[in-house]
Image: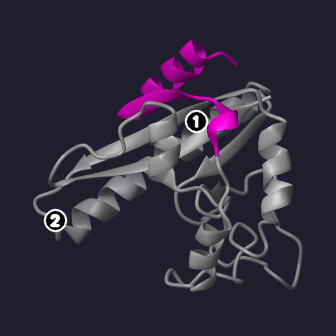
Amino acid sequence: MDYAEAAALAEATGFTHTGPLDPKTLVLKQEVRQMCQANTCGQYGKRWSCPPGCGTLEELAAQIGACTSGILVQTVGQLEDSMDWEGMMEAEARHKKHFLQMYESLRTRGVPVLAIGAGCCTQCKTCSYPDAPCRFPEKMVRSMEAFGMVVSEACKANHLPYYYGPDTIAYTSCFLFE
C-alpha cells in the first residue's frame, strides 16, 4: 500500500496527523524494554502484547525488516491544562478506536500489515498470557514501546512532529507494509 492511499484511509478513519514512515529509521532499544521491565504500567509479564511475551528485540526487528514502507498515525488531543487526566484518556480512547478501525479495514482489504499501536493490547478483557496461547493473534496489537522504540525519535526520524504545544497530547502508532 502506498502512502497516499494509507494517508487517505487514516484521515477517513479520524486520525488528526499522519506521516510517511521508513521502516529502516526505526531503532529498537534495549533501554526501552528495560523501562517496560520496571513495570510502571503494571502489564509487564501479563500480556502477550507486552514484554517478555511479545518477543525478543531480534524477533521484532526481523518483523520490521520484512516491511518496506509505512505510515505514522496520530491523534492529538486538546487539554484544559497539563493535569487534564480525563482529556488525556479521551484522546487515548479516540486514538485506539481509530487505530483498531484502520487495522480492521486494512485486514479486510487483505493488506499485509504489521500494526504497532500505543499502549497494551485491549482485545480481551483478560489476557491468556502465559497459561494459554493468544486467543486472537491476528488481532493482537503490540505497542511501539514493546518494540523498543522511543516514539519521539521515530517521529523525528520521519519528519512528523511529536509535540504540538502546551495543553496538547499526541498518541502515535504506526502501520508497516510489506
Q: Is residue 157 magenta?
A: no
* Residue 44, above or below 103: below
Quadrant of the snapshot with the N terminus: top right
Query: How many marks do you count on the picture?
Result: 2
Q: Residue under circle 2?
A: 82
Res 76 visible: yes
Report the quarter where the C terminus lies.
Answer: top right
| Residues rendered magenta in the picture | 1-26
Q: Tell me residue 24's x, y (percent).
A: 70, 35
Alpha-carbon span between mark 2 and mark 1? 29 Å
Q: Earlier in the sequence, mark 2 or mark 1?
A: 2
The crowd level at tag 1 (other Cα within 10 Å; few <14, some 14-19, many 20+) is: many
Residue 45: image quadrant is: bottom right
Question: Residue 167: image x %, image y %?
Answer: 15, 55
Left of 166 or right of it: where is 56? right
Q: Is residue 20 magenta?
A: yes
**Which kind of residue does numbered mark 2 sit on?**
Ser
Of tags 2 and 1, the one toward the viewer is 2
Q: Secondary structure at mark 1?
A: helix
Q: Is residue 137 visible?
A: no
Q: Tell me what residue is drawn at x 50 percent, y 18 percent.
A: 8
Look at the picture and state if 118 lies above or below 115: below
Q: Compared to 145, does 108 lie above or below?
A: above
